[in-house]
Amino acid sequence: MKDGTENMTTDTIVAGSKKSASSINLHTIENGNGTRLVVSDLGAAVVSLFVKDTNGNFKDVVLGYDTPSDYQNDEFYLGTVVGRYANRVAGGTVVLDNATYKLHLREGGYHLHGGLEGFNKKTFQAVSFKSKDKGGVIFKYTSPHLEEGFPGELQLEVMYTLDDDDVWSIEYKAVSNKTTLVNFTQHTYFNLSGNPANTIDDHELKLLSQYYLPVNKLQVPTGEIANVNGTPFDFKSFKKIGQDILQHNEQLQLSNGYDHSFVLEKQYTPILKHAAIVKEPVFGIIMDVYTTEPAVHLYTGNFLDNVKGKNGILYNKRSAFCLETQHFPDAPNHPHFPSTILKAGEQFYSKTIFKFSVTK
């Protein structure tokens, strides 16, 4: 076997961040198959991911931007790590260890994706590594006490690894000096055709989930854990993403498409489990998703509207989909949801895997 990381390189692009003149680094990890993952210090963002299709041609299967300033001005979390709390927390007031904390709120009265300047806007410290059959980057960020309202100084480590089996692994480790909330996710937008000028309507999706979380008009979970049977949310067997997306369904209309969490387990157990499979019908690229998280959030790019992306391509509604592995949104307000409380001094750990292959 060829050394899967001998071609791993680190490039630097110079661009001032909002608050400093520090440069932003791009790290390129390439395995022995030629699969290539390009990631940035800014937001630990995945900028590009090149994988082979069934004809042996490489496709860049993720959305991204051309410049650091595009990421600094991004409103869609393209490819970034999201935290401290991914998704929504209604009201934004949490009580931990008998102390009350108020999280940053959006108009509408809910906290979203870590606040005004969540982890997607932070410059991480990054170190590349390589071994015989895999390579990767370790990103580190220390979130100060009360950043965006969250208690505790939180030390976060995110490790991306690419191996010769075309497996991209994401591992999160975190520890806080005060009891706090954590719910991290990776917000990469995928289009397995490699051409986001096309929609992902024909991508075939299977979710290993019997239940989903309905939302209210603010897209906050109602607390119900609903059975998918007989609804447009039934992806237990392969189905085109676009097959039911235009149905007259209150939940689809509230979110302008799919923007819902699918339950992988009601009672959280930190074991790696199969969450999803996606197949692209023309070029034959397949993506399997595994995670230790209890939910996967399906988002179908409902609010992309002429967003200028890489190579000048405009991203629009359903140009891509996200499969965001995470705990349940709004868990602090629903005691029957798996807890997102991290006790002081305890270590949080989570792992998600995206495995790429082609139709045989």
Image (cartoon, grey):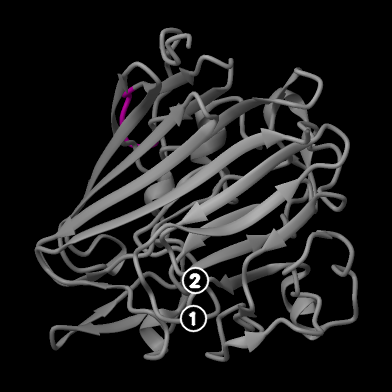
Image point 14% across, 88% down: which residue? 98
* Of the pair 47 and 138, the residue shown nearer to us: 138
What amino acid is found at the position of numbered circle 1 in the picture?
Answer: Gly
Residue 236 visible at all: yes
Q: x%, y% of residue 289?
A: 57, 51
User: What secondary structure is found at the residue carrying circle 2?
Assistant: loop
* Of the pair 283 and 73, the residue shown nearer to us: 283
Image point 41% across, 90% down: which residue? 336
Q: x%, y% of residue 313?
A: 78, 31
Q: On residue 191, which mark appears?
A: none
* Of the pair 351 and 312, the residue shown nearer to us: 351
User: What secondary structure is found at the residue carrying circle 1?
Assistant: loop
Image point 43% across, 63% down: which residue? 293
**Is 358 placed above or below 88 here?**
above
Residue 321 visible at all: no
Q: Please tell me how crowded label 1 is: few (under 14), some (14-19), or many (20+) other residues with Cα within 10 Å.
A: few
Tag 2 and tag 1, C-beta contact below 8 Å: yes
What amino acid is found at the position of numbered circle 2 in the picture?
Answer: Arg
Give the residue at mark 1: 109
Left or right, 19 with respect to 290, comes to left
Q: Please tell me how crowded label 2 is: few (under 14), some (14-19), or many (20+) other residues with Cα within 10 Å.
A: some
Tell whether position 231 is magenta: no
Left or right, 291 with respect to 58, comes to left
> Mark 2 to mark 1: distance in Å?
6 Å
Give the residue at mark 2: 106
Query: Which residues, given as a range, are shown in magenta?
Result: 18-22
